[in-house]
């Protein structure tokens, strides 16, 4: 309450709390009083409601608004199993592949190369969100078929983006992990649709999403009965323009403390520059990430999108032992690739 | 080029430009050389492509990537006509109403109140995006019907949000203006769907969207053949937490210079505090905004959402003459409400 | 407290509060308890101290940490009188002049022009902070002398920046208002030195300073016994690069609510583009600013610094009546210039 | 040039360039033309100057404005030697100690503890910048004397902050490394004063400083003849409030590419939470940092400042072998502490 609040102002607040079946406790101070409220059923809009009252200086919410994504209510690490590939726990997963699926030759060549280097999942975009309407937007279902073909040849489970609720069924027919892109982190219909699908979900953090909003978006998916959420930090937007985004590795370490969900890192989008991918990949593992998703292209300077941040197959192969080294230094190990299907 | 670039590095870049049917011109300096390229058909990804080349220090795009939204290619102001209400030009439009439609009594009471005060359009959310899955998300189609009823009673055209491509047809049956919310500014399927609908579109700026990305999202809509785009600045996310968002009035003035589209301002979301709505509404008009969209609720402290930023009907009525005064000071005038339907 | 906190955890917190002569009150809830503390003598570091304790989930400070700058403890507007020019209250002050003093001819010509157009104070930099060591940094004391000469000729009080504590005495010999630049908003020795000087102080907001930090910097000055603080919003740094800075007019309106100090606006630095200065000047007045500080240069395209954001004398003269119009629309009026000294 | 620029507009730009002894080359395109300029002597303000001209759409600077800090002009790594402790190259340096020097007992106890754990330099603040005037601001010269005593006992060189130009001589009498705090990164008089001192300088990045501004501040120091600059990333200010700051490890990796200067990381300020210090310390080393500066306090919950982000001596001792492990994984090694002075 402000220092000019009257007893009547306080009583009005208390009455309103009663209407919500809540009981406020007053703490009287020299200059001002505060009213504390606790309860499992505090409406999310109570803060706004109360702040309008006369004599109220500020209302502050202390309890975190997410529960199912919170470690407090679920102390043990969630482990997501994707066709035998484990995400979470003591293993570090490396997902690699091109930004966009461009052709059969391109995706197969990349899939074999990243598998040979030790990656255990394949990424590739069939539906691409692009800020300009004049840019390549992916091969669509044809891209999904090429990904499935690459899985058949290499045994690598596939991760691919779904952009709109009506596409979820289609993409889920092919994909092993449904990726929610940064621009869609708060597309709630899409979150609920992938929540109903029961496929594992890779939930990228929005460009300007707070930690709490990210957890709430995970909550949307879990709340539909799908606990297989893998978080992905991919850089946030800040004032800095020397890199495409600013990777927030604080957030990765914070996920491990506040949530039970596995979290991986995307240093390709997080930096936007191929020559920064290796140091940030290593840094992410050291910060506690459960894995990485890295763009690899056999010929990055002819890629249809994001070539500037893609590693060549050779650079990726050179990076993998370094990742293994840092993983070992923090008590983890790279997954051993499974046998190729006969 | 970097200062260590060789002639061969330069030649390689020139050859690649040729593959794109572009011709680069070299400008030789004491320390380094630069290669300039102009042309209407420069691929959007050329910058990334070229930056990977050996000897290239940096590639910079100078031409703006949007055209149909640009004043350069369309010098005259676009005027959007919504059932006779003019947006753009010398008139200032005021759109008012509750954040969410809650009940027949609430929306009718608000519609009459804002009309009596001089508003010429009615806003109200039937589908609400909410960051928590545990919060009220709107009445859906029932809300649309109540808005239509309010329009019938007051003659006010209605503005309401559509959140997902499959809802566009439904919402367009009722709404006069389709609102694209900040979280959906880069939901490209949705942009294209409202682009195909031919209804007027209110395109809110994303929370962390740059000016250029905002223009590109308008481009998506116009590119589907719908020129009736009304831009809306509603605050951006910055480090400042004393207000809910930071209103970017620079951007409003910049729209008037760089684009031909009308732009309005949403001081309710832009500040998040009802007591800052009036000063920022006036400031927006002074900065050149073509109008305002303001949250008004007959009983804000019992609103189901965003009550803390809503004006009461009385406060709104008191604000309208002030808006008229500032509009007059910058050479504009408030629209005269049309006659109520008999 | 977290939901796993034990009674002993709670007791430990209570004991520590006792050591500070504070008494905590417990509010017990279903899932967790909270401990409330009120008092005028809560140490600023208590939050950090308590957050380390076992079982403590989060500590939140509710009371604002500034007092002397706060309207709560000083309800009436502060009016600053600078040689008869009033800042605050119902008058709008316009301070104008070049970014840097360059020559006698330049400063005199500008001073006369801005005075003739209705400005009531003259600005001009003698000591200039520049991000590159290779850039013009001002004429120093010679610049101060030229400013004093311009004051003698025109009667306009002068505002000029002081950058380092040891220069305060020197600058104060010439200046009527000591300007603290954005980069120095948290240069505490400098704040205290100008606090001791008793000259009026123009305190620019730091590029990334929160509202609260800005008020605390004012507190530093007032705390030395100098109540003549004029706040100045000049744009903050955000992700947006289409303009030099993002003007935060929300903050101007918030100053009027939370503080008693006058606040002016600097649309020249706030936008960085001369063609945005007029709309943002008008918007600032409409938002409640007590005045403006505007860069004017007789020949901006030959200015030694910040030419791109300076108005020509003609543009400035054309802007003044518009400012007067908007000021009138919000119940204020432009100051009438005083008689020129004989 | 804009697409409406006339030949005369182009000629006017070319003439102005001639006045600067620069020659512009025109590249004519279908829709517009561009004018390219190269040269070692382009004035820093040319961009602003040219942007005002009629027909000019935008002026873009491509060359980087810093030289002496740039790897392009100084390809080999700079190694800074502080009383035999090497910063840069293949060794990882760990600087540890309390935020503020509080007492002889505290600083000596901490110094011994961090030395025993393997730190090779001691940090401690004698002059503390604090955002509130009501907070502890350090012991001043008495603090410096206690640091010198700790050096005498442990052999650890000392790093301490200097806040104002007039204190440089005093602080340099005691310190081995002069620390420039984040708030002072653009205090140019201070940068030049430490530039003249010839002591090694630890230059913290400003809270909202771009990469380029940081390099330019280093340039200020080097330009006075002092090449012994150690950069320090300590977190930037973003929209995220779940952590005190956002560590920008992208910037650490970028320093290694664009500059020859050594760079260390401050995970204590970068996260603001003691439980995030270890993961971010390891991540920084993995990203390529040449070392760490870590806050350690024997009794953090009674520290006079920043206790919430300090490690206990025990936690620090437990962290050191992990740092050694990650350093080894990226081809570096922790420094071996020197023999204690007899």
Image (cartoon, coloured by chain):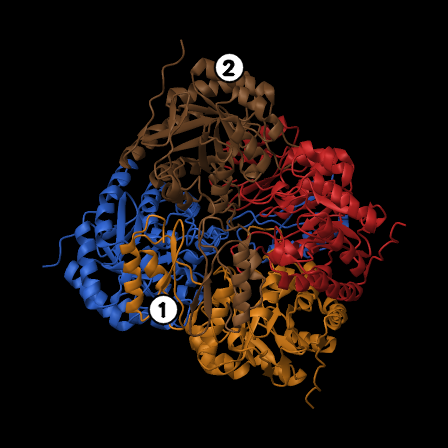
Chain colours: A brown, B red, C orange, D blue
Q: Are marks 2 and 1 in contact (CB under 8 Å)?
A: no
- Mark seen at residue B111: none
Looking at this view, name the residue that lies furthest to the bottom. Answer: C342
Quarter-of-image position of residue C94: bottom right
Quarter-of-image position of residue D302: bottom left
Check the residue under mark 1 and report the chain it is in.
C
- Mark seen at residue A149: 2
Q: Relative to residue A149, is residue C195 depicted above or below?
A: below
Disc tally is 2
Left or right relative to D282: residue B15: right
Q: Relative to residue A167, is residue C235 depicted above or below?
A: below
Whether residue A52 is visible to the viewer of this picture, yes or no, is yes
Q: Nearer the viewer, mark 2 or mark 1?
A: 1
Looking at this view, name the residue that lies furthest to the top. Answer: A342
Count residues near mark 1 (Cα–Cα under 10 Å), then give few for <14, some for 14-19, many for 20+: some
Left or right relative to B342: residue D195: left
Q: Are marks 2 and 1 on the same chain?
A: no
- Mark seen at residue C43: 1
Check the residue under mark 2 and report the chain it is in.
A
Left or right relative to B259: residue A184: left
* Place of residue A84 in the rendered image (x, y in percent of width and height, measured from the top left): 38, 21
Whether residue B78 is visible to the viewer of this picture, yes or no, is no
Distance, label 2 to label 1, CA atoms, is: 65 Å
Of residues C161 and B181, the one nearer the viewer is: B181
Of residues A101 and B71, the one nearer the viewer is: A101
Looking at this view, name the residue that lies furthest to the left. Answer: D342
* Place of residue B16 in the rendered image (x, y in percent of width and height, measured from the top left): 58, 28
């Amino acid at each position: 309450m402000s220092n000019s609040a009257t007893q009547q102002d306080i009583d009005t607040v208390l009455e309103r709390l009663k209407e919500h079946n809540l009981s406020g406790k007053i703490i009287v101070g020299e200059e001002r009083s505060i009213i504390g409220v606790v309860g499992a059923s505090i409406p999310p809009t109570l803060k706004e409601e109360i702040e309008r009252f006369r004599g109220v200086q500020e209302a502050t919410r202390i309890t975190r608004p997410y529960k199912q994504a919170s470690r407090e209510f679920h102390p043990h690490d969630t482990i997501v199993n994707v066709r035998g590939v484990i995400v979470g726990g003591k293993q570090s997963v490396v997902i690699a592949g091109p930004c966009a699926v461009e052709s059969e030759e391109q995706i197969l060549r990349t899939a074999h190369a990243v598998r040979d280097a030790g990656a255990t999942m394949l990424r590739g975009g069939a539906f691409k969100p692009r800020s300009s309407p004049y840019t390549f937007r992916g091969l669509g279902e044809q891209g999904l078929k090429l990904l499935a073909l690459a899985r058949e040849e290499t045994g690598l489970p596939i991760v691919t983006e779904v952009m709109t609720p009506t596409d979820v069924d289609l993409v889920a027919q092919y994909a092993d992990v449904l990726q929610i892109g940064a621009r869609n982190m708060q597309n709630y219909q899409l979150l609920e649709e992938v929540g109903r699908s029961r496929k594992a979900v890779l939930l990228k953090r929005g460009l300007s999403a707070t930690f709490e909003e990210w957890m709430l978006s995970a909550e949307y998916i879990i709340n539909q009965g799908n606990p297989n959420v893998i978080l992905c930090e991919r850089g946030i937007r800040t004032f800095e323009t020397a890199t495409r985004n600013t990777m927030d590795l604080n957030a990765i370490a914070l996920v491990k403390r506040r949530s039970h969900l596995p979290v991986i890192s995307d240093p390709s989008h997080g930096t936007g520059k191929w020559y920064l991918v290796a140091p940030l990949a290593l840094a992410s593992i050291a910060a506690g990430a459960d894995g990485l998703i890295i763009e690899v292209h056999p010929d990055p300077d002819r890629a249809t999108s994001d070539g500037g941040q893609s590693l060549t197959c050779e650079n990726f192969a050179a990076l993998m032992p370094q990742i293994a080294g840092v993983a070992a230094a923090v008590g983890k190990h790279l997954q051993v690739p499974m046998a190729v299907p006969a």
